[in-house]
Image (tube, grey):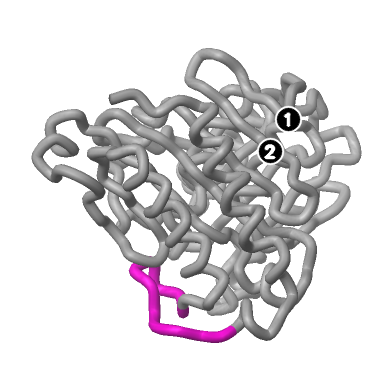
Amino acid sequence: MEISINFLKQLAFDVYNRVHPLLGTKEASKELERGAGGDISMHLDIVAENIVIEKLENINADILLISEETGETYIGNKQEALKNKIKLIVDPIDGSNNAVRGVPYSSISIALAIGERISDISKAVVLDLDTRDIYWAEKERGAYLNDNKITVSNNDISRKCIIEINVSKKNLLNQLNKYISIVKKFHNLRVMGSTALTLCQVARGSMDAFMNLRESNRLVDVAAGFLILKESGGFFFSKEGLDINNKLSIDLKFPFIASNAILEPFFKKELSLLSLNG
């Protein structure tokens, strides 16, 4: 069984068509139970995820769905899914809090992997739920915004670089102080609210780097953006400056840093110095 990039794109558009009219409405924000990812599921999240499940069932897919709301669910024949190792990693609404309040920065994130680890992600789609712009990539085939190929910026630290930084509210000042030697060298900071979409902003060169320092950051948030960033020439690594290639699981959570190619040595040097200084 092969799931094409065109199917993933259409799946994202199907979600868009159903949920876009709900953005910013009271109906969208109705709280339900806590999802597998740990956050409270809202009506908008469930509507989006149900569309994904329905479309997979319609094509008789035998697949493991790793999704923000339901966790890990086998669609079709479980034994076939185990044998073919195909996994679809989905955050039905990345940036739910933005979406339900009408803040124009949310997305649907869909990644396809054949294998067990992050490096096995081979196709990815992130669709902006406000603009309908679609970011997509196939492994070793480049990354695209709609029909146009995209690449990361070529800004070094001497330029007016823009970085997004995402940190937990717990010990907020301590965390910022720990990384102040890095943060103060950037021209502007942003906090946007959709991890998948910000990874795409770095991939297209609109932002230069993204430090997501939250230990609670989930696989479903980054799976698609990871491939799009890599295929656009960007880098994705841990706070220790190491490659991230964990096993794919709904339970996987990790902080990360994403950057263009020119800033990668800067980050790794600074992180090494922070490590030496404790």
Q: Are marks 1 and 2 in contact (CB under 8 Å)?
A: yes
Q: Quadrant of residue 161?
A: top right
Q: Disc 1 residue type?
A: Asn
Name the residue located 37 percent from the left edge and 36 percent from the top edge: 118
Can you say whether 214 is above or below 224 in the image?
A: below
Mark 1: give few (<14), some (14-19) or many (20+) Cα within 10 Å.
few
- Can residue 219 be seen from the camera position used here? no
Can you say whether 95 is above or below 272 in the image?
A: below
- Can residue 248 be seen from the camera position used here? yes
Left or right: where 181 falls relative to 189: left
Q: Which residues are magenta?
A: 30-40
37 inside magenta stretch: yes
Can you say whether 194 is above or below 44 in the image?
A: above
For mark 1, what is the residue?
146
236 inside magenta stretch: no
Can you say whether 125 is above or below 14 in the image?
A: above
Measure how far apart labels 1 and 2 are at the Cα level: 5 Å
What secondary structure is found at the residue carrying circle 1?
A: loop
Name the residue located 30 percent from the left edge and 29 percent from the top edge: 114
Give the mark nearer the N terminus: 1 vs 2.
2
Q: Disc 2 residue type?
A: Ile
For mark 2, what is the residue?
134
Name the residue located 54 percent from the left edge and 79 percent from the top edge: 170
